[in-house]
Image: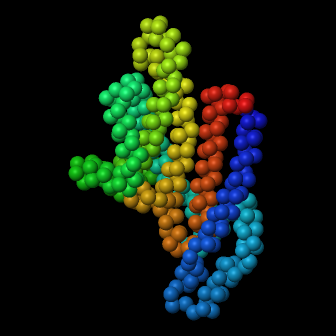
Amino acid sequence: MGRFVGQRLATLIPLWLVCALAVFLLMRLAPGDPAQILAGSGASGEEVRRLRSDLGLDRPLAVQILGWYGRVLQGDLGVSYQSRAPVLATLLERLGPTLQLALTATFVATLLGIVVGTLAALRPRGWGDTALMALTTTGLALPSFLVAILFIFVFAVWIDWLPVRGYVEPTEDLARWARHMILPALTYGVIQGAVVARMARGGMLDVLGQDYVVTARSKGLSEWSVVAKHALKNAVLPVVTVVGLNVGVLLASAVVVETIFGIPGVGSELVRAIFQRDYPLVQGIVLLVVTLFLFLNLLVDIAYAALDPRIGHG
């Protein structure tokens, strides 16, 4: 297992360096001058040039890239152009709500997906299977903003059970935190749960035809006992990959849901930073998401190898 983890890390490090370079270059290619935005529309050309020099934007691109690489490898993500606060401190402050949302939504998606996928696989091609797969297809087709609007209309406007926007720290009031987190978690959970359900159904169909499951049935065990004790562990193997990738996707797509529901996470901060051409903050946020995504992929690979030792020794 140690050799397997070492090999995976050896492939992820160069990938991380390439992603960091791509983030830097994409921001420099984007239209808009951060010095002009920071100085204001009434600033003179001399003031803008002086500000560009202070920010280091007048240096050759290669010098800027090497300087940024050097600072990032030392854990220094720079200082925000707008707030003048360290980017790392801003990210750590904003990361909590985003991770809470991603983990809560992943729990909803996993639970919903495994239950729906298992129920569908028990009667393949029956009316229940057809109806559940039609629902998952609908879930996959709907964009997140439309699902969010639907939930807001039903749960916040029509029956008035839940708040539309806002966020409360769980340490401050756990009950209010949960009420504010339900709608955004459901929005993510329903969409990603559809992916998990399809993977769970396919995995369960493969496992239910295996000899050891037939043997368990021949011993007179109940169907639920066969599924829960013998089939489920092997059937969720492909689901592990999807769940791990789901967390990364949720982190990357937090912009939409955090903006709609007013959650002060890294997604909503990224929107503000892009409009203000706050290069250090945008680069820091995207780099953080890339790092978490790669780390989650590593955890998925380790979990996969733990569930199926043939992978770890391959």
Q: Which residue is depicted at the point 55% across and 49% down?
A: 248
Work out whether residue 10 or residue 108 is closer to the camera in this orientation and state it. 10
Work out whether residue 8 or residue 267 is closer to the camera in this orientation and state it. 8
Q: Which x, y percent locates residue 104? A: 46, 44
Extreme residue toward the front, this view: 125
Quarter of the view holding residue 111: top left
Q: How is the image coloured?
A: rainbow
Q: Which residue is depicted at the point 50% across and 87% down?
A: 41
Q: Which x, y percent locates residue 103? A: 49, 44
* Up-down relation of residue 126 to residue 78 (above or below): above
Extreme residue toward the left, this view: 158
* Up-down relation of residue 236 to residue 98 (above or below): above
Q: Is residue 207 left or right of residue 20?
A: left
Quarter placement of the N terminus: top right
* Up-down relation of residue 255 to residue 181 (above or below): below
Q: Which residue is depicted at the point 51% across and 25% down?
A: 206
- Whether residue 38 is visible here, answered yes or no, is no
Quarter placement of the C terminus: top right
Quarter of the view holding residue 313: top right
Q: Which x, y percent locates residue 29? A: 61, 72
* Up-down relation of residue 259 to residue 236 (above or below): below
Q: Is residue 291 left or right of residue 227?
A: right
- Whether residue 45 is visible here, answered yes or no, is yes
Q: Which residue is depicted at the point 66% across and 63% down?
A: 22
| Picture mark count | 0
Q: Is residue 197 left or right of residue 74?
A: left
Q: Which x, y percent locates residue 126? A: 34, 26
